Image (tube, rainbow, N blue to C red):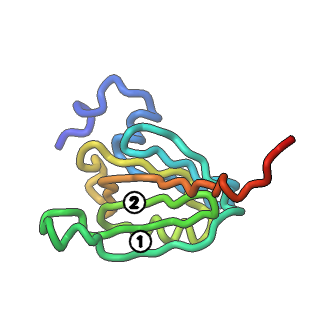
Amino acid sequence: MDITTTTEGLTGAERFKQTYCFETEPINLIALGVTTDDQRQYMFSYTQYLYSESSANPALEDKPDAPPQRLEIHFTVGTVTIVGCGLEPLARAVQKGELKSVWRLTKKSLDPNSKTHVNSVSVAIHQKQIGNAPASE
């Protein structure tokens, strides 16, 4: 594949987002930026990080061609679910507090050396139980 023709006319940031599906920084970050499949953007504070879980994608039982891996990143306020393949670098970056942002690639990565491909990113926000809150006067 000729990368120059597929990225022609794109800014450096646009080219980066089409080539890769995550970004890291070699420092402890304050927040993880997430862009979901519907293009909503979220920021999750690493101070609210609880745990991560890597597993096989349960969709494989029904769809053999589904992406093979799932990574769930749990925060006190919500859960980020990433589905794809080669997700180990993302899990390691979360462990170190170095995962800066993640998004879904709309097509195959343009980097021939990349083994990581994010097919889907979703967020579930944990709603507070409003019924238990005291009434305001």
- In the rendered structure, the answer to whether residue 133 lies left or right of residue 105 reads right
Which element carries disc 2, helix, strand or loop? strand
Q: Which of 118 and 12 is in front in this view?
A: 118
Q: Name the residue under label 2.
A: 82
Amino acid under label 1? Answer: Glu
Judge from the rendering whether residue 43 lies leftward or rightward of residue 52; answer left or right. Answer: right
Tell me residue 78's x, y (percent): 56, 58
Image point 41% across, 33% down: which residue? Answer: 14
Residue sitting at x 55%, y 45%:
42
Residue 106 in the image, given as x and y percentages of width and height: 28, 42
Q: How crowded is mark 2: few (under 14 residues within 10 Å), some or many (20 or more)?
A: many
* Residue pointed to by mark 1: 88
Q: Residue at x 41, y 52 (%)?
A: 122
Residue 63 falls in image quadrant = bottom left
In the image, 82: left or right of 99?
Answer: left
Q: Which residue is most to the top?
A: 9
Residue closest to the eye, 50 or 15: 50
Q: What residue type is labelled 2?
A: Ile
- Please state, as top left, top right, bottom left or bottom right, where the N terminus lies in the image: top left
